[in-house]
Amino acid sequence: MDEGRDVFSFPVGEGGSARSAETDGARRKACSAKPNEPRGTGRRRTPPLARFASLTLPYREGRALALPLAILLLAPLPAQAGEPVFVDRAGDLPVVHVYDGGWEHFVGGGVAVLDCNGDEKPDLYVAGGANPAALLVNVTEGPGAPIRFVEGAQDGALGGDTGVTGAYPLDVDGDGVLDLAVMRVGANRLLKGGPDCGFTDATAQWGFDAGERWSTAFSATWEPGRARPTLAIGNYVDRSDPNGPFEACDVNELHRPEGELYGAPVLLEPGFCALSILFSDWSRNGRPELRVSNDRHYYVRGGYEQMWRLDPLEERVAADGWPRISLWGMGIASRDVTGDGLSEVMLTSMGDQLMKLNRGDGYENAPYSIGTYAQRPFLGDDGRPSTGWHAEFGDVDNDGRADLFIAKGNVDQMPSNAMKDPNNLLMQTPEGIFVERAAEAGVATTDRARGAALADLDGDGRLDLVVVNRRAPLEIWQNATPETGAWLAVTPREAGPNVFAVGAFVEVRTARGVQVQEITVGGGHVGGRAGPLHFGLGPAEAAELRVIWPDGTASEWVEAPVARRFEAIRDGETLVLR
């Protein structure tokens, strides 16, 4: 396994440069290799535009597409049909919600997206930091109607909950109703979902050790033979360390169920100030592993990005193919971008935003020319490095290619980094290159963004956008992109305890080829989404679907309805759509 060269993405200081060793390495890598072949690591100096004759990228239909690199670097990309357009709906919110607070809320600010009342409309649970978290219930009248929310219950388990950094929806007890894992500065909470977006505190009922740490990351997976999901908690700085905060990173935790209750947490040591973690079967071998993205601002030296195996529980090291790389890790996004069925990862940071291409037995850095590094603001005259937080893939224009949103914003008043740092909306072209369209789409706001989500809030088949800001109001953006492609949205389900099939891979086949998405819980920046997997289909008028379930069993291919949300129910090897 080859995770690539050491990464040091330094922000600009006085007389410094935003170019990082990671960026330089990506520029130097030989980009003419065939898909899935290792790339060269030579460092011979050559003139910048003469380094490579062409760039070869995997094309979605399985062919390699070679383009002159000079064209990719220099030629302006034309506007595409169906340019993204978003309409601001924040003015229709019932409250002005702000993620706020002091040092302990410089990070965090996540949003959980879930249908908490069974009406097939995604609702929001939004962290507030020093302010109370907010439950916003979706009351949008129908597809294409203006997106509207009302306040949910402000009493009981949800009443006045401050200190919340973020939350993730999942079904903990296997009853088919989504629950919430709430991350906090202080004791974390597990909230059991009930009717009409009602939640009860089940932390003690489920035997969960809530702790008193500063929790900033979460992920979950279902291990074979267990009645509950295995939960991982990522913790930031140890607030009790008198010598902190620098070099005072806290440990992370693994909570494994013992029957229907949770045992004492197992500490994942060392910890390096985790800000995003994700369980994923990244190599498609049936054994999920836990990726941990860490913030070197506080671990300072000696820390690195981590990967933990579960069975046996051990950290990957250089000897088994996990070389140490270091960055200001803020968020993780995961999606198959190249069309080979393996999920790439996007790691946000200060300076370069790092895309890692999955080669099955390891990762390699995406070439700089792919367009995802987004290392500086693309608007204004501030040349200092960007600060990336939540990242998420989604097909914004339904053309059958995953696009990428990155929430941006200065930590607070960090002078080394850009103060006005617009969010990125990177649209993927047919050539596999990502181009910036946030300004054209209207979503290039410059508040200090933290968490975010792409979800179809009005049910029209187009992904809308939620952005949580530090010390600025919550943003809601309705996707009004014209001339979008076909789509479908599917929710796989199987018999408990893993009702929503976390760990499954869903494949959708059209005449263009096969798209693959893995069902995961975690990643992002202290927030995530549960609900239908959205697939853009481009010009396709028909599609087929199959599910590779968490136990490795593959369903048969079945014809899937287009322009619909539906469930895919497991019945042996048969897939029942409804």
Image: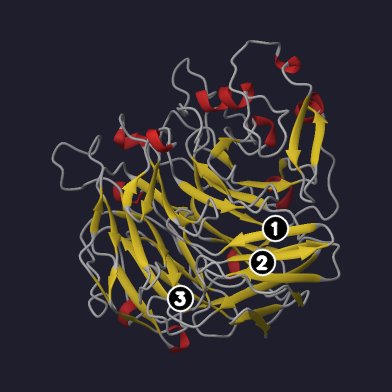
Which residue has dot 3 on it? 498
Could you tell me if residue 441 is visible in this image? Answer: yes
Considering only order in the chain, which callout, 2 or 3, is on the residue closer to the N terminus? 3
Q: Which residue sits at x=78%, y=30%?
A: 72
Callout 2–callout 1 Cβ contact below 8 Å: yes
Mark 3 falls on what kind of element?
Answer: loop
Disc 2 residue crowd, few under 14, some 14–19, many 20+, Cα 10 Å: many
Name the image quarter holding the C terminus.
bottom right
- Residue in front for this viewpoint, 156 or 33: 33
Residue type at the position of mark 3: Asn
Q: Does residue 489 appear left or right of residue 486 in this picture?
A: left
Considering only order in the chain, which callout, 1 or 3, is on the residue closer to the N terminus? 1
Residue type at the position of mark 1: Asp
Callout 3–callout 2 Cβ contact below 8 Å: no
119, above or below 51, in the image: below
- Residue in front for this viewpoint, 471 or 175: 175
Q: CA distance from mark 2 to mark 1?
A: 8 Å
Q: From the top left corner, tell me how far across and down residue 498 is, in percent.
A: 46, 76
Q: From the top left corner, tell me how far across and down residue 33 is, in percent.
A: 71, 30
Q: CA distance from mark 3 to mark 2?
A: 20 Å
Which residue has dot 2 on it? 534
Residue type at the position of mark 2: His
23, above or below 258, in the image: above
Which residue has dot 1 on it? 395
Disc 3 or disc 2, which is closer to the eye?
Answer: 3
Considering only order in the chain, which callout, 1 or 2, is on the residue closer to the N terminus? 1
Q: From the top left corner, tell me how far across and down residue 183 is, in percent.
A: 34, 62
Mark 1 falls on what kind of element?
Answer: loop
Disc 3 residue crowd, few under 14, some 14–19, many 20+, Cα 10 Å: many
